[in-house]
Amino acid sequence: MRASTTNPESTAPPGFVTLEEAARIARIGRTTAHDIAREYETTAGAHGLPVVRFGKQLRVPRYRLEDWLGGPITWPIADHDTPVASPVASPDTSITPVASAARVTRRATRPSGQNTLPFSA
């Protein structure tokens, strides 16, 4: 049995990327990527995202994607879905939550002694 010669930690981009990976690289939505890939196929390559069809699967040649974007891509793809740190509030423990006016009004209109709905389930 032969050992695999591919390095899983390689930083070189692959020759082909999926349509979803191309969308992430171009920072467009998946549906938009499919739409402009379909445009590429219907215009015989005149417009759209350059794709190659392998059966039912679409793949984007890396060198064509780089030409389309106007520069080299970096690999692995930077994950732009990482959450941005939100500002941290000062830990002031003297602040107490305030009930909304609607909630106070509803509770105020309930007859005294009624803790549940007026009908049975």
Image (tube, rainbow, N blue to C red):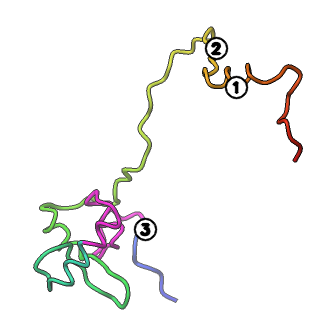
Tag 3 residue:
8
Residue type of the residue flagged with mark 3: Pro
Residue type of the residue flagged with mark 2: Thr
Q: Is residue 114 above or below residue 34?
A: above
Q: Residue at x 33, y 61 (%)?
A: 29
In the image, 69: left or right of 113? left
Give coordinates of residue 96: x percent, y percent. 64, 14
Q: Residue at x 43, y 46 (%)?
A: 82
Q: Earlier in the sequence, mark 1 or mark 2?
A: 2
Tag 1 residue:
106
Q: Quadrant of residue 35?
A: bottom left
Q: Nearer the viewer, residue 20 or 79?
A: 20
Residue type of the residue flagged with mark 1: Arg
Name the mark nearer the viewer: 3 or 1: 1
Badge 2 element: loop
Give coordinates of residue 3: x percent, y percent. 48, 81
Q: Are marks 1 and 2 in contact (CB under 8 Å)?
A: no
Name the mark nearer the viewer: 1 or 2: 1
Q: Residue at x 19, y 79 (%)?
A: 40
Q: Is residue 83 above or below residue 63?
A: above
Q: CA distance from mark 3 to mark 1?
A: 60 Å
Badge 1 element: helix
The crowding category of the residue bearing disc 1, from other C-alpha atoms within 10 Å (few below 14, some 14 to 19, many at least 20), is few
Tag 2 residue:
96
The crowding category of the residue bearing disc 3, from other C-alpha atoms within 10 Å (few below 14, some 14 to 19, many at least 20), is few
Q: CA distance from mark 1 to mark 2?
A: 21 Å
Q: Is residue 10 above or below residue 118?
A: below
Q: Is residue 83 above or below residue 59?
A: above
Q: Earlier in the sequence, mark 2 or mark 3?
A: 3
Magenta residues (range)? 9-35
Q: CA distance from mark 2 to mark 3?
A: 52 Å
Badge 3 element: loop
